[in-house]
Image (cartoon, rainbow, N blue to C red):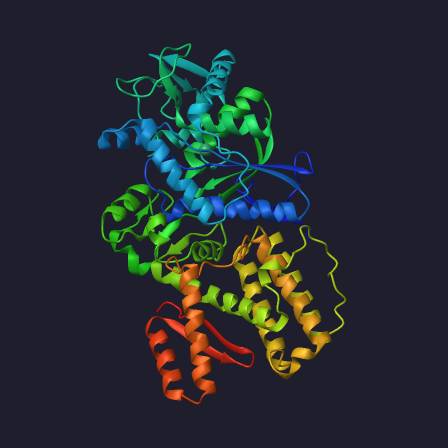
């Protein structure tokens, strides 16, 4: 089955066919940088990072753009509250955002344009819209005239006539129609401002995304993403501006990710419901929570409690269009699941004397299984690999794909148990080879999801020195045991256990690991 994607524009799943194959352009709306990233800010980048990885794996040449809104009302207010310059706050928050993306291994973004670095392109667009009769000036502001664009409402499936009642429409006496929106805003005292044909001012929020996506991806491109809350008015407005300006279709596929919801236990702060009745955590709540004791939705705080890979795994464990039920407990649950993979990687190393992380996975999908499935085990692996593709081809269903990774993990562990690959079966080259081929598929599929790219840092406080000291104690314990001094050996194990270090005696010697977090 070819790749199917759900398109908000048509409200159905469609076969994915890029505008100019093999090229694929993806634009995803990034944050307004006025508060530290909360978990919801990471959902779009993680899912689009995976979408890009998968499309590349299918052989496409993908460009991914995520913008940074560094001038906007909320940002101006937040900077004023703190008594610092807008630019200073924007830089501080952008740094936090980028740092979180790095930790989560969102590393396939090609361009991250800032609104303030694209003012010329924005002015050109606004001017073009005025010339074509789609926009008008009023006291230094410029508004888009929605009545001139009959298709307005086609993405959000709203009737333009009913838009007057829209709750999220900014009121202004200067507008001709209540749904008209600002392309350019006249400067107020103390605000950042740029020269323009309409006097000093700054861009409205929506226009920057049209200007920056067209700059990097052309006038018509393949995929536009963002949170579900952006469908209206933001994306509706992007379509109107862009298509009015170019006279061409703006975007072929609109993909919207579900929003973050607080799971029951955490919901006491009260999630807000939007007009469709969808509950989600909005930024003001996140901000409130960051100031209260439950500051755990702030990513930099959360990553002190759980490894970044657990957060990535957590985000991918829900299909991107569904709301993500968040609580610290849930992320920790996912972390325990991750640990079962890490333990398998250690087992892989004991069996093969090679690191799982050194396996070179195929970079491109081939429908042929890379090995002859001549054993029942490899036949099972091939079946799981096919199921993984079916899940990803079904509108990037990463939740089902992760389910397949777990099944593959179980199959590998069962095979190693059955053939005693850590015991007397260790010398059975044929079995070990089949095991390695199975593990290579696990590496291949997890790579597509951007998982297990590097060994987990065992703990922030674990330095190389700590590891060496533990090794000394493990060696001393082995010596005590060989001298039949079991009391001392047990004492060493007990006291390491108190520090959360677990020793496991295995045929090839003792291995250690940190106990799972409670
Ligand atoms: Zn946008």
Point out the image quarter for the C terminus: bottom left
Q: Position of residue 157 (x, y in %)?
A: 48, 37
Q: Is residue 79 left or right of residue 500?
A: left
Classify residue 15 as left or right of residue 460: right
Please tell me which residue lies in front, 132 or 444. 444
Q: Position of residue 366 (x, y in %)?
A: 72, 54
Specify the quarter for ligand 1: top left
How many tags in the picture? 0
Relative to the observer, which residue lies in front, 268 or 83?
83
| Most foreground residue, 192 or 181 | 192
Q: Residue at x 37, y 32 (%)?
A: 91
Is residue 331 among what the camera can see?
yes
User: Which of 409 and 157 lies nearest the eye of the viewer?
Assistant: 409
Quarter of image, res 368 = bottom right
Q: Is residue 220 above or below residue 450?
A: above
Q: Is 175 left, or right, of 475 in this rendering?
A: left
Residue 28 in the image: x percent, y percent?
50, 38
The image shows residue 509 at horizontal and vertical percentages of 52, 78
Observer able to see residue 176: no
Left or right, residue 43 beside residue 408: left
Residue pushed farthest bottom?
Answer: 484
Residue appearing at x 58%, y 64% in the figure: 404
Instruction: Give the residue displayed 39% in from the left and 36% down from the top.
Output: 94
Residue 192 figure quarter: top left
């Amino acid at each position: 089955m070819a790749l199917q994607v759900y398109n908000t524009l048509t409200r159905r799943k469609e076969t994915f066919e890029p505008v100019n194959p093999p090229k694929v352009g993806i634009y995803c709306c990034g944050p307004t940088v006025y508060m530290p990233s909360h978990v919801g800010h990471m959902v779009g980048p993680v899912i689009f990072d995976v979408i890009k990885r998968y499309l590349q794996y299918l052989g496409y040449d993908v460009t991914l753009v995520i913008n940074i809104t560094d001038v906007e009302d909320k940002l101006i207010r937040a900077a004023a509250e703190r008594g610092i310059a807008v630019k200073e706050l924007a830089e501080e928050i952008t740094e936090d955002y980028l740092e979180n993306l790095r930790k989560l291994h969102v590393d396939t973004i090609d361009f991250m344009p800032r609104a303030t670095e694209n003012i010329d392109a924005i002015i050109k667009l606004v001017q073009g819209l005025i010339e074509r009769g789609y926009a008008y000036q009023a006291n230094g502001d410029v508004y888009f005239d929605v009545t001139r664009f009959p298709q307005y409402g086609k993405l959000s499936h709203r009737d333009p006539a009913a838009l007057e009642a829209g709750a999220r429409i900014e009121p202004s006496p200067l507008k001709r129609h209540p749904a008209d929106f600002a392309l350019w805003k006249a400067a107020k005292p103390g605000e950042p401002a740029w020269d323009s044909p309409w006097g000093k001012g700054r861009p409205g929020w929506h226009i920057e995304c049209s200007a920056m996506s067209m700059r990097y991806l052309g006038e018509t491109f393949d995929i536009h993403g963002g949170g579900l809350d952006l469908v209206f008015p933001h994306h509706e407005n992007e379509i109107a501006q862009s298509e009015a300006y170019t006279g061409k279709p703006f975007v072929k596929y609109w993909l919207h990710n579900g929003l973050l919801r607080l799971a029951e236990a955490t919901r006491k702060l009260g999630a807000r419901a939007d007009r469709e009745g969808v509950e989600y955590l909005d930024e003001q709540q996140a901000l409130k929570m960051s100031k209260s004791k439950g500051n755990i939705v702030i990513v930099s705080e959360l990553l002190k409690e759980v490894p970044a890979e657990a957060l990535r795994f957590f985000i991918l464990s829900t299909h991107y269009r569904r709301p993500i039920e968040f609580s610290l407990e849930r992320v920790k649950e996912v972390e325990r699941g991750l640990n079962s993979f890490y333990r398998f990687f250690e087992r892989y190393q004991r069996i093969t004397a090679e690191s799982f992380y050194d396996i070179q996975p195929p970079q491109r999908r081939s429908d042929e299984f890379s090995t002859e499935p001549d054993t029942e085990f490899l036949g099972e692996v091939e079946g799981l690999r096919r199921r993984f593709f079916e899940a990803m081809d079904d509108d990037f269903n990463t939740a089902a794909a992760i389910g397949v990774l777990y099944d593959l993990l179980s199959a590998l562990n069962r095979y190693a148990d059955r053939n005693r690959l850590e015991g007397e079966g260790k010398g059975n080259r044929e079995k070990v080879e089949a095991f390695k081929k199975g593990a290579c598929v696990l590496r291949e599929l997890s790579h597509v999801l951007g998982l297990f790219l590097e060994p987990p840092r065992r703990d922030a406080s674990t330095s190389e020195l700590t590891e060496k000291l533990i090794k000394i104690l493990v060696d001393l314990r082995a010596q005590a045991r060989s001298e039949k001094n079991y009391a001392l050996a047990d004492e060493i194990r007990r006291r390491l256990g108190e520090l959360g270090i677990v020793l496991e005696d295995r045929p090839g010697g003792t291995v250690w690991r940190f106990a799972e977090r409670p």
